[in-house]
Amino acid sequence: MTTTRIELLRHGLPEGDDCFRGHTDFAITETGFQQMHDSASGCQNIDLVVTSPLSRCKDFALEYADKYDLEVIEEPAFKELNFGDWDGVPKQKVWETNQELLMKFWSHPWETLPPNGEGLKAYDQRIQQAWLHLLEQHQGKSILLVTHGGVIKQLLRQILEIPETATYLQRLNIPYAARVTITVYHDDQGKLWPEVHWS
């Protein structure tokens, strides 16, 4: 049996803290960078760094990989949800101009899309495909995956087999620079046995 270990690391505090931060490429703040350094200090024997291409993830990933002489791979499929017309816009402004649709999106996210944005089903599928590809391509390695809070929520939903309901989005709190360890056991029949470890 082979074991793959993935350290999921959310980015630290970025600029645009009051905005819908999806694909908008907000920079990481100095505070956020330090948060990530503190959190990643517990990682051991990392073989490979994989990162969202957005600056709030990538800037730290590149520095970490350079420090430890590791390969770094940018994977666009691990980007945050695309909020469409709301992306990069302050949440208060969206609330003032599009309150009804925003409330519907919060209450029924699987059925409601942000204007010109990405649906939760498509988002969930792209993350699942990227995750399975990661495990296939790098089986047996220890990986630092630098990504976003929403991506981590979707991965936990999939691994814990949480139903497609709105409640887990509100009930899972993934703070800045949170680190969650997942070990995946690959058996001889090709079945995956993931296990979540709280740091």
Image (cartoon, rainbow, N blue to C red):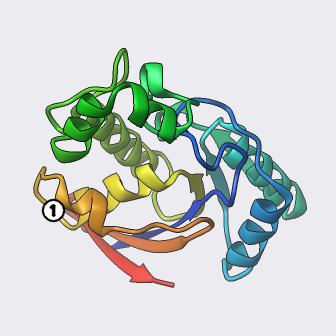
Q: Residue furthest front?
A: 96
Q: Which residue is mark 1?
A: 161
Helix, strand or loop at label 1? It is loop
Residue 15 position in % (x across, y down): 73, 46
Position above or below: 157 against 22: below
Position above or below: 63 against 126: below
Q: Is residue 38 visible?
A: yes
The residue positioned 39% from the left and 48% from the top of the image is: 131
- Structural crowding at the residue carrying mark 1, measured as other residues with C-alpha within 10 Å and reported as few (<14), some (14–19) or many (≥20): few
Q: Residue furthest top?
A: 116
Position above or below: 13 against 95: below
- What amino acid is at disc 1? Glu
Report the number of discs: 1
For the residue pair 108 and 137, the one nearer the viewer reads as 108
Position above or below: 56 against 152: above
The residue positioned 28% from the left and 68% from the top of the image is: 171
Which image quarter is the N terminus in?
bottom left
The residue positioned 89% from the left and 62% from the top of the image is: 67
> Which quadrant would residue 179 be assigned to in this image?
bottom right
Q: Is residue 167 left or right of residue 32?
A: left
For the residue pair 50 and 81, the one nearer the viewer reads as 81
Q: Is residue 79 visible?
A: no
The residue positioned 18% from the left and 46% from the top of the image is: 107
For the residue pair 193 and 110, the one nearer the viewer reads as 110
Residue 174 position in % (x across, y down): 46, 66
